[in-house]
Amino acid sequence: MPTPTTTLALGPDWLDPEWLISTFGLLGILAIVFAESGLLIGFFLPGDSLLFTAGLLTADGQYITYPLWLVCLLITLAAIAGDQVGYAFGRKVGPSLFRRPNSRLFKQENVVKAHEFFEKYGARSIVLARFVPIVRTFTPIVAGVSRMNYRTFVIYNVIGGVLWGTGVTVLGYFLGQIPFVKEHIELILIAIVAISVVPIAIELLRARIAAKRGTTAAERAAAEQAIRETRQHYGKH
């Protein structure tokens, strides 16, 4: 019998990757990956750390007894399916998404950031967003709102789903067999979480610096103007 690992609590149990996997198993992983990949309410769920832990526990045979290839295949399919649903939702909702009021689970600024990310990287954003928390949830939705060519979206969605879903899981699987990693799993998970939130931390730092310079109001006005221009742009289609 494998010895259970003891991870350092990084937040509530329902956001701890090992607790989620030990409680809900592979089906729980697939549900979370699907939700985080394309449902508006999934942006706060653990993504990279969950996949890494899934690979690690697959190597241990702890909680996950399926072969690695099957785990990777199912996770990748869940990620691809999630983005497909997000794209379809964006096409259906259209520009009204940019008029949706803020709530506890929805912030207009998240949509704006995803839109800026999409505008900056184009079709590549579907792949790159996979590795950026929060942005990966909203980018396929924004792609749908923008009515991105469906065939192009599917191609990039599959590429991104494979690189993220399989890549991070395989990384956890092989690193999980290294004695140092197994003995310091709590530190490894902290590092994974830290790396995954670096983009968010950078944005917060930039906002704080801007506030000290007195440019926050101007940036907010610019963001609001961007939303208005986006509404006008989509309103013509």
Image (cartoon, rainbow, N blue to C red):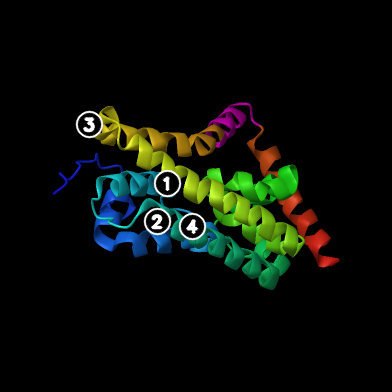
Q: Residue at 74%, 47% (x, y): give it.
A: 122
User: Which residue matches tag 1?
Assistant: 169
User: Which residue matches tag 3?
Assistant: 183
The span from disc 2 to disc 3 (Cα, nearest Å) is 24 Å
The span from disc 1 to disc 4 (Cα, nearest Å) is 16 Å
What residue type is disc 1 on?
Thr
* Magenta extent: 203-214
Q: Is residue 37 left or right of residue 65?
A: right
Q: Earlier in the sequence, mark 1 or mark 4?
A: 4
Total numbered labels placed on residues in the image? 4
Q: Is residue 70 visible?
A: yes
The span from disc 3 to disc 4 (Cα, nearest Å) is 29 Å
In the rendered image, residue 117, in percent from the top left (x then y), is placed at: 67, 45
In the rendered image, residue 185, in percent from the top left (x then y), is placed at: 27, 35
The residue tagged with tag 3: helix, strand or loop? Answer: helix
Q: Residue at 77%, 56% (x, y): give it.
A: 230
Other residues around mark 2 within 10 Å, as few (<14) / some (14–19) / many (≥20) = many
The residue tagged with tag 4: helix, strand or loop? Answer: helix
Q: Seen from this angle, which residue lies furthest bottom?
A: 92
Q: Which mark is residue 36?
A: 4
Toward which corner of the image does residue 219 lie, by quadrant? top right
Residue contact at pointers 2 and 1, CB within 8 angstroms: yes
Q: Give yes or no for residue 211 being in the magenta stretch.
A: yes
Eye-nearest disc, 1 or 4:
1
Toward which corner of the image does residue 98 lie, by quadrant? bottom right
Q: Earlier in the sequence, mark 1 or mark 3?
A: 1
User: Which residue matches tag 2?
Assistant: 71
Eye-nearest disc, 2 or 3:
2
What residue type is disc 4 on?
Glu
The residue tagged with tag 2: helix, strand or loop? Answer: helix
What residue type is disc 3 on?
Glu
